[in-house]
Image (tube, grey):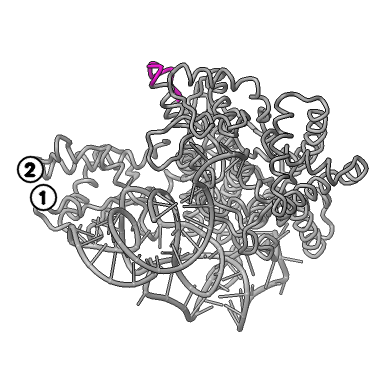
Amino acid sequence: MTKDKFKIQFAEAAEAAFKEIYGDIDRTEGDHDIFTRDKIYDGLETPKDPKMGRFAFPVFKYAKLLKTKPQEIATKTADAINTYLDRQQRTPLLRCEAVGGFLNVKTDFNTLARETLGAILSQKEKFGSADIGRNRKLLVEYSSPNIAKPFGIGHLRSTVIGNSLRRIFKKLGYDVVGINYPGDWGTQFGKMIVAYHNWGNKDTLEKDPVKNLLELYVRFHDEAEKDDSLNEAARQAFRKLEEGDPETVNLWEKFKTISNEEFNLAYGTLGVEFDEVVGESFYNDKMDSVVARLEKAGLTRISRGALVVELDDPNLPPCLLKKTDGATLYVTRDLAGLIYRWEKYHFKESLYVVGTAQSDYFKQALQVIDKLETAENLPPEQRMTGRVRHIEFGWVKFEGTSMSTRRGKLVFLKDVIDQAMALAREKIKEKNPDLKDFEKTARMIGVGAVMFSQLSVRRQKDINFIWNEVLNFEGETGPYLQYTHARLCSLLRNYEGDIGGEVDYTLLDREEEQRVVELLADFPETVTDAARVYDPYMVTAYLLKLSAAFNKVYQRKDENGRIDKIISDDRELSKARVSLVRAVQTVVKEGLYLLGLEAPEEM
RNA sequence: GCCCCCGUAGCUCAGGUGGAUAGAGCAUCGGUUUCCUAAACCGCAGGCCGCAGGUUCAAAUCCUGCCGGGGGUACCA
C-alpha cells in the first residue's frame, strides 16, 4: 500500500489528541490499544461530498467506551488535533473540523498542489510507480483461447483483464510474467478430427480456415446429438493423438497453425502482450511424473474405472486425473502446469485470469496441490499453496442471451472491432475531417471502445455485450477518456510558454481546479488498490472521475457566463493552469496505458 | 437436490473492511459554441437499494429465511 502522507500526519496527531484527552480511561479493547495511529489510519474514510474534506474519521465507535456523545468527542478532539498540528508544523498542512460525529480533515491546498503537481511533472509517467513488488515474481495467465475455435468476444475479457493486470503489477515493481496458455489439447481435438474426416476437406479448409473450423465444430455437435457414436469416435481420435499417430498429429498441427495466425492478428490489433506462450500440449510429457508423484504420496485411487484424487471438501467431486480409457483431462495438464511453473519460477504469486465457470476446477486443482504438499511434508517455503489465485470474472452475454460456440452462436471479435472502427471513421470525418493519422486514430478509438467494454464493470459481474453500448462513444466510454486526453494535448500544443520552473499554484483557486488536484493525488493509491483486488476496474473508475473533473475545469464559466479559459493573457495564471493540464494529461495517458488503451493526441 | 455468484433509477452500472441527504452514464426533455476539439459541459425528471425478519448508536453494505436470475455439480475445457 502506498500510504498518503497527509493521512499519516493526521493519524499521529489524532493519536496524541485522544491520549491527551482520554488518557485516564482504559482504552484497551481486548489487548489492543484502540487509539494507535495505525488503527486510526485504517479507520479513515472518504466523505460523501469532497467539499467536506479530503478524508474523515468517524468517532461514533468510541462513544460507548468513553461514555461521551460522539459530537462532543469530535468537537473536543478536533481542537486538540489542530493544536497539536500547529505545534508540529511551521505551516499548517491540515485542518480538522468536527461535524456531527465526524472529524473532517482538509488539506492545505498549496502544499498538496506543490507536492502532487511537482511530483507528476518531474516523474512524468513514473508517477504512481512503486517498488513494493521488488524481487517478487508474479505470474499472470490470461487469454488462453481454444485452438480450432474463432476468437470471440467471450475470450476478450480474460485477455483484456490479464493484459491490464500485467501492466499494473509491473508498475508496482513486480517481476511479472504474462502467460498465454492456449487450449491446444483435449477431447475437442478428437471431435475436430472426426468432423474433418467426415465433412471436411483440404480445399474448403484452406479457403477460409477459421470459418471452416467453426462450421466443422458446430456440425459435429449438431450431428452428435442424433448420433452418439460420434462422441465415441472423437474419444478414440483423441487417444490416437495422445499416442502420437502421425496422420492425426499432422492434422492437429494444421489446426493449430490456422488458429495461431488468427489469434496473433487479434493480439496485434488489441495491443495485447505476453511474455510467454505455452499451450496445454506442452505439458503432455510432464503429466506422468505428476501422476506418479501423487501416487507415491498415496493420494490416488481408482474409482469407477478412472484414476482420481479424493478431496476432503464435501462440496467437490473427486479430481479426475485419467479417464476410464486412460486419456488425460484438462485438470491433469493444469496440475502439471502448476508444478512446472512453481519449479521454474518459484513465484511469489501466480494469477489465473479465468471465468467464474471454472471456479470448482480451480478449487479441485489447488486442493490436490495442497494435499500433495502436505503429504510430502514440504517446508512452507517450498509450498505453492496460498500463492496461487483464481482471478475469476463473470460471463460475457450477448444482447441478453448466452453465447455458445457449440451452436455457432457467437460474436467474432473481428466483426466487433471492424464495426467500432467504422463508426470511429465516421465520427472523425464529421468532427475533425483534416486529421492527419486518420486510419491509425480510427483504430485507436475503435479498439479502445471495444476494450473498454470489458473494463467498465467489476470483474466479478457478468457483462452484457450490447451493440448500442459498445458502439457509443459518449458518456462513460473509452473514447470519452481518449477524447479528454486529446483535448489536454491540444491545450499543450496551443500554449506558447514554458511549463517548468517556478509555478504559483495558489493561482489555482477555483473549486473545480482544486478538485482535479485532489484526484491527481489519489492516483498512486488507486493503482495499489487495483492490484490489491486484482481488478483494473479501479483504474477505469478513477479515470472517468478524473476526466469528468477536468472537463468541468475546461468548460467552467465565469461570473459573466463566459468560458474561463486555461490559456489567457495572464501569463502566471496560464502557466499554473497549463501545469495542471500537463499533470492531468500525464496521468490520463498512464492510466489508459494501464488499462491497455492507446491515448491519441488528436482525434 | 446440493454448492457458488448475483438482484440498487426505464436501461447499463458505482456505492473498499457497516457511517453523514443512495450516486454516475445511457435513453427522454430543456439549455450552453463569434469555436483553448460540443466525442464536451449545465439543468429537469427518474429509487419501499428483490421480500421479510435480526444484529447495531448507525445496514444498500453484516446474519437467517424466502422469492427471482446465472453458473457449477467426475470421465468437455
- Identified by mark 1, the residue type is Leu
User: In the orientation shown, which residue stands out farthest toward the right?
Assistant: A203
Q: Is residue A202 visible?
A: yes
Say which residue appears at 64% left-offset and 54% top-offset: A478
Q: Secondary structure at mark 1?
A: helix
Which residue is at the front of the view, A493 or A227? A227
Q: Tell me the magenta residue range.
A: A375-384
Q: Where is residue A180 shown, x and y percent of the image?
A: 65, 33
- Identified by mark 2, the residue type is Ile
Mark 2 burial class by Cα count in 10 Å: few <14, some 14-19, many 20+: few
- Residue A594 vs A49, above or below: the answer is above
Residue under circle 1? Answer: A66
Q: Residue B77 occupies which quadrant of the picture?
A: top right
Q: Secondary structure at mark 2?
A: loop
Q: Where is residue A436 shown, x and y percent of the image?
A: 84, 51
Mark 1 burial class by Cα count in 10 Å: few <14, some 14-19, many 20+: some
Confirm or deny contact between disc 2 and disc 1 (CB under 8 A): yes
- Specify the subunit that label 1 lies on: A
Q: Is residue A163 visible?
A: no
Determine if the magenta segment contains residue A376: yes
Query: Between disc 2 and disc 1, whose residue precedes?
Result: 2
Q: Is residue A146 left or right of residue B58?
A: right
- Specify the subunit that label 2 lies on: A
Residue under circle 2? Answer: A25
Say which residue appears at 58% left-offset and 32% top-offset: A324
